[in-house]
Structure formats: structure tokens, C-alpha cells
Image: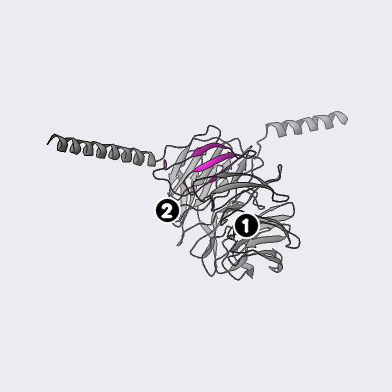
Amino acid sequence: MLKNKNVLIGLLIICIMIGPVSAADWQMFHENQEHTGFLKEAADFSAQVWYFQTGGPIKSSPAILNNILYIGSNDGSIYSIDMENGNKLWDYNTDGAIVSSPVIQNKTLYVGSKDGYLFAINTDNGNVEWKFKTGNSIESTPTVENNTVYVGSNDGRVYAVDINNGTKVWEFDTGNSVKSSPVFSNGTLYVGSDNGKIFAINTDDGSQKWVYTAGDAIQSSPAFFNNTVYVGSNDGNIYAIGSQDGSLTWKFDMGNKIASSPTIDSNENSLFIGSDEGNMTCLDTRDGTFKWSYKTGGAVKSTAALFDNKITFGSDDGTVYTINKYSGKEEWSYSPGYYLFNSPITSSPAVYGKNVYVGSNDGYVYALNADKETGPTSVFTYYAWAAIIIFIAALLVVRSVMKRRKNE
């Protein structure tokens, strides 16, 4: 009997060793429901670098499932893209720009549109399973928990919608537009509003638990860590608020509006957040102590993704930066517009395996290899060369004209 038991245990161990290991995907904005921006079990995935063109600026951030990337565009479409080569698998067009970021659960994608609808879309074929109408455009990114999808609308309400049939469970009136994306933890939803308030909402019935008032609109999306809600405001402050009673733990003045959302490194008690001042700043999550700041050439509305000992994010100067999370020193950067044709990068990157995926206001999605520190040679290379050639030709013409006049 003991011998048979040992054989059975041995067989189980072998099955575990040779069986496929399911790696975590990046299925929502900022990777998880707490919006910490960190993928704990990144896949061993390394594809070629590529770019993919949409029909409008991209402010939406990518979601990833089974080596397929999903992202919205201001052209009104949600795109499904093969991460191996950048080929389009399908697209679905709504009647409004998509700045909301997609969230995926059980092969269904949830995303809001400026046409006012929340869509549930089958990830296999792009077919709409249902859509839910709100009273205004949706810029907030949904979150999903317990068969319910939660999303804010510019009609001032947060909605709880049944994921099975798209019917409303409850709604909560914040009093102003909700561009902030809700974060879920322990039966409570935390979300900001343009009236400068952050709300804690009971997900059972949509009742208010508490409210905290900042000095200006909250369009940053909260992050949750260690019983604390972290969120930025247009008043220039990052707030740490106790999740139980809404009391202020600490705040830190970033010097300008904060549209970026916090990224949390739980191992180092570090918080990373950008501001319109152009800085990516690292603070201590426990008391808001300043650790370091990195200055870019434009506002930082993009939210950082954390991987290995690095963070990566975009800037309005048109560059994707990779920074050492301990020192704040730049390790690598990528500018698809080659500085001459740079467009703001407000989309927040997703990290998967050795690759970084991010959208740009130039209308392209870029796949970068963070390990090799390489990106695709974008279409703007040819524009840059053309501009240089035209400039040199103009100089030669001017020189020729001046020489001719001198000889006369």
C-alpha cells in the first residue's frame, strides 16, 4: 500500500513538472484590481519588435490575454492584435473615441466608449455580447469582480452592471464626471470624481461608505495597497487615504496636475507617479517621504508599469522611458518620432515577458524589446530623413544663390 502511494505521488510530481505552466496575463489597466502595475508571474515571452497603425490617437492602454493584445483608439475602434508579429486579428468600431482601457475576464472584453456605451465583446471574434448605455461618454476604465463590471461615466455616476446580460445592478451618483477608473478591494469600490472627491462605495448595494475631498478634480485612478488608497489630484497632490474610514494618512505636493495613476512596489514600499510638471517621482508608501524624481521633456500623464528592477512609462515629449526603480536613473528610452515628429505618449504601457507594449498619440501601437533595449524603426524614420534632405537641399540652394550674387 505504501509503495503504491509513493508511486502515485511520484506520478503527480512528474505531471506537474512536465505540464504546461500557465503564466499570468495583463488583463486590465494597471494589471490588477488593486492597480499596482506589477505582473508577478511574467511570461517567458519575447516577440519581434513591431508597430501597428490605427486611425487615430491612442490614449487607451493595452490588455493582454494568450499572446493577443487588445487596445482602443480615438478612431472609435477596439483592436485585437497578434503579439508575435503585430498583425490585426479583428477590430470592432463604436460610435465614439475609445480612451477607456479594455478589461478581460473569461474571454470577454469590457470597454467604454465616448458614445456612452459600455461594451462586452467576445475576444475570439470581436462580436458584441451586450452593451449598456450610460447618460454620457465613458472615459473611465472598467473593473470586474463577482460577476459584476463597475465603470464610471461622464454623467457623474458609477455603474454596477451584471456581466451575464448587461443589466444594471445599481448606480451611484458622485455629483460630477467620473474619468477616474474604479479600484476594487474587499467588497469596496474606490473611485475619484471631477468634483475633487474620492468615494468608497459598498459593492453589495452601491451605498457610500465614506468620502474624502481633495482640492481639485480627481481624474487619476486610485491604487490600493496595505489598507491605503493612493490617488493623485489636479490640485497637484498625491493623497494616501485610510481605506477603512477615509482619513488622510499623508499627502505630497507634486507641483502640478496629476493625471497619472500610482504604481506600487510592495517589496520596497515605493510608489511611482507622474505629473504635468514632467517628472516621474518615487515616494515611500508609508509616509510619503521623497526618494527620487526623474525629469522628462513633457507632462507625464502615462502610468508606469513595474518589471524586474525597472519602471517604464510614456511622456508628452513623445518618449517611452525605462528607469531604474532604485536610483531613478534612465536605463533606456525610445522615441518613435525621432524628436522631429514626436507625439505625446499618454497611454500606459503593459509589460509581458521581455516586451513592452504602448500606444501613442501618433496613432500607432509599439512593441518594444526591453531586454535588448530595441524598438521598431518607425514610419517617422522616413519623414525624418526627408526633412534632413530637404534642409540640406535648401542650404545648398541658398549657398548657390549667394555665390552667384557675389560673382555678379
Foreground residue among 121 and 387: 387
User: Is residue 361 inside the magenta stretch?
Assistant: no
Residue 22 in the image: state x and y as whole percent.
65, 40
Q: Residues within 10 Å of mark 2 (few under 14, many from 20)?
A: some
Quarter of the view holding residue 376: top left
Q: Quadrant of the C terminus?
A: top left
Please report whichever mark, 2 or 1, sits nearer to the chain's N-terminal start. Answer: 2
Residue 111 in the image: state x and y as whole percent.
55, 57
Foreground residue among 265 and 82: 265
The residue under label 1 is which amino acid type?
Asn
Residue sticking out furthest to the right: 1
Q: Which residues are magenta?
A: 312-338
Residue 258 horizontal side relative to residue 389, left or right: right
The residue under label 2 is which amino acid type?
Gly
Q: Quadrant of the N terminus?
A: top right
User: Is residue 322 inside the magenta stretch?
Assistant: yes
Q: Which residue is mark 1?
A: 237
What is the C-alpha distance between the residues marked 2 and 1?
32 Å
Q: Which residue is mark 2?
A: 56
Residue at image point 51% right, 38% down = 333
Foreground residue among 4 and 276: 276
Helix, strand or loop at disc 1?
A: strand
Helix, strand or loop at disc 2?
A: loop
